Image (cartoon, helix red, strand yellow):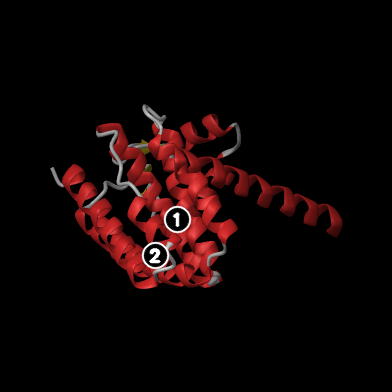
Amino acid sequence: MKARRAGGDNEKEGEVDRVYRVLKNWILQCEYRPGDFLAEVDLARQCETSRTPIREACNRLSQEGWISRIRHKGYMIPPVSIRDIVEIYEYRKLLECFNAEKAAHTASAEQIARLRVILEVENRPKAPVAEILAANDAFHLGIAEIARNQRVLDQLKLTLEYVHRLDVLSTQRDPGWVPHGEIFVALEARKPVQASKAMAAHVDSARDRMLKLFGT
């Protein structure tokens, strides 16, 4: 009896994890947009599951700030606020300037070459926006991995999830993006201070772009 209960618990946890990943991916890819209302019965149908895993997965998403619970009604995707943008990019700049400076000290020729390959998509005419966004994530995480501070990397991964969602929303309004050339030049030249300054300017430009798009 105990073994069966344990197995049932594991299956339940596995289903909650699956539903959590599915819903979070839909939020990150903006299939659910800010202001959208989500009903448990609809989510259960879309995820092909029961309402219990939906409820538990939504509790996790609510704790992480991806959704807001509306008592006795369901859930809502919170609107993007100016304060959200300012706080996300302030924190991002702290993490990424540290990473850029340290990576400029420690990057190998092979690591620099991999970053160069990642950025090739930016120079391709009419490159799909999805590919540019994927390269953006890979470039910033690549720098963090070169910097080799696991705690900073973990926090940056979480921060870039919020940034990725903003990027998806913003490119639906304006397909432009903020390039990474100056950061790469500083990394390749092994100039830590210049790399940090280039990263700060990049993050500030990305923040200002978001404020312009979402502040209107």
- Quick one: which residue is furthest to the left in this view? 216
Mark 2 and 1 residues: CB-CB less than 8 Å, in contact? yes
Classify 212 as above or below 202.
above
* x 62%, y 44%: residue: 18
Left/right placement of residue 35 relative to residue 64 reads left
Where does the image place residue 71, in percent across and percent down from the top left? Answer: 36, 50
Residue shown at the point (53%, 71%) measured from the top left? 106
User: Residue type at mark 2?
Assistant: Glu
Locate the C terminus and report the quarter of the image it occupies.
Answer: top left
- Residue 179 image label: none
Q: Residues within 10 Å of mark 1 (few under 14, many from 20)?
A: many
Residue under label 2, please give it. Answer: 96
Of residues 143 and 62, the one nearer the viewer is 143
Q: Percent from the top left, x then y, of residue 204?
A: 24, 58
Identify residue type, mark 1.
His
Give the residue at mark 1: 140
Q: Is residue 56 above or below residue 154?
A: above
Q: CA distance from mark 2 to mark 1?
A: 8 Å
Q: What residue lies at 54% left-to-right and 63% top-to-bottom? A: 145
Residue at disc 2, secondary structure: helix
Q: Residue furthest front?
A: 189
